[in-house]
Image (cartoon, grey):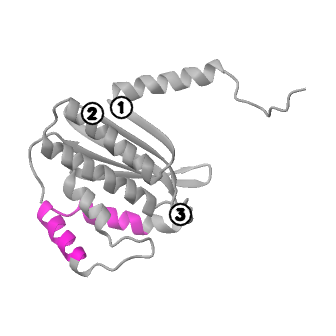
Amino acid sequence: MSNKGPSMELDQNFMQNILSLYDELIENGISVVYIGKFTHQVIKMFTEKNEEEMESSNEQKQVRRRVHHSLVEILQNMQKHSTEFQTEFSLVNGLFMIGRKDGVYYIMTANKVSKNDIEHLSKALECVNNATKEELNAMYKKQLREGKISDRGGAGLGLIDIARKTDGKLEYLFIPVNGTDYFVLKVEISNSEDEIE
């Protein structure tokens, strides 16, 4: 008699959904999808893999630097705003995707957030999205000088710095799924040569 517990069955409908999603991801230029816990080692692995891919495709150094910096900031931001902190190991569950399409790199993350944090996070995102590049640079320098460390460990620099290093507005959604709120963030980095201070 087997002591094995129930296992996942190979289901045709499930696999059709997965393969359809796979086709859609490829069509949208997504090269990496990760679901799970974010440790220092996992973040390091993503940044190194992405750096290697950009280097092998002869991407400009300034673009590689912007993508790398944005990637690190976004993953750290994801940890700061998640409700699934495990303080002993600083782990957080989430979804991460990176892709490139039509000369634009984009990074997307999704993680659980507390309903109580949604309003504060929305206001911070709108403040960043409504600022010009010059205002973002001024906000960043001011936060470096005067920013107070929040109870989540950040001085408000994360979102400001992501906006400084990326193109356009920070796209975001708060999506309720089965009684849980998810925070989804998407940023884009073009392969232009513009260097940001």
Q: Quadrant of the C terminus?
A: bottom left
Find the magenta span and give its range.
120-144
N-terminal label among 3 and 1: 1
- Give percent across and percent down for residue 55: 21, 35
Query: What predominant SS class does the magenta segment belong to?
Result: helix
Say which amino acid is labelled 2: Glu
Q: Quadrant of residue 135?
A: bottom left
N-terminal label among 2 and 3: 2
The disc label shown at residue 114, or none: 3
Pointer 2: what residue? 53
How many residues crowd mark 1 within 10 Å: few (<14), some (14–19), many (20+)?
few
Whether 83 is drawn above or below 75: the answer is below
- Give percent across and percent down for residue 67: 24, 46
Q: Nearer the viewer, mark 1 or mark 2?
A: 2
- Give the Cα distance between marks 3 and 1: 30 Å
Pointer 1: what residue? 31
Q: Are marks 1 and 2 in contact (CB under 8 Å)?
A: yes
Q: Which one is nearer the viewer's eye here, 36 or 171?
A: 36
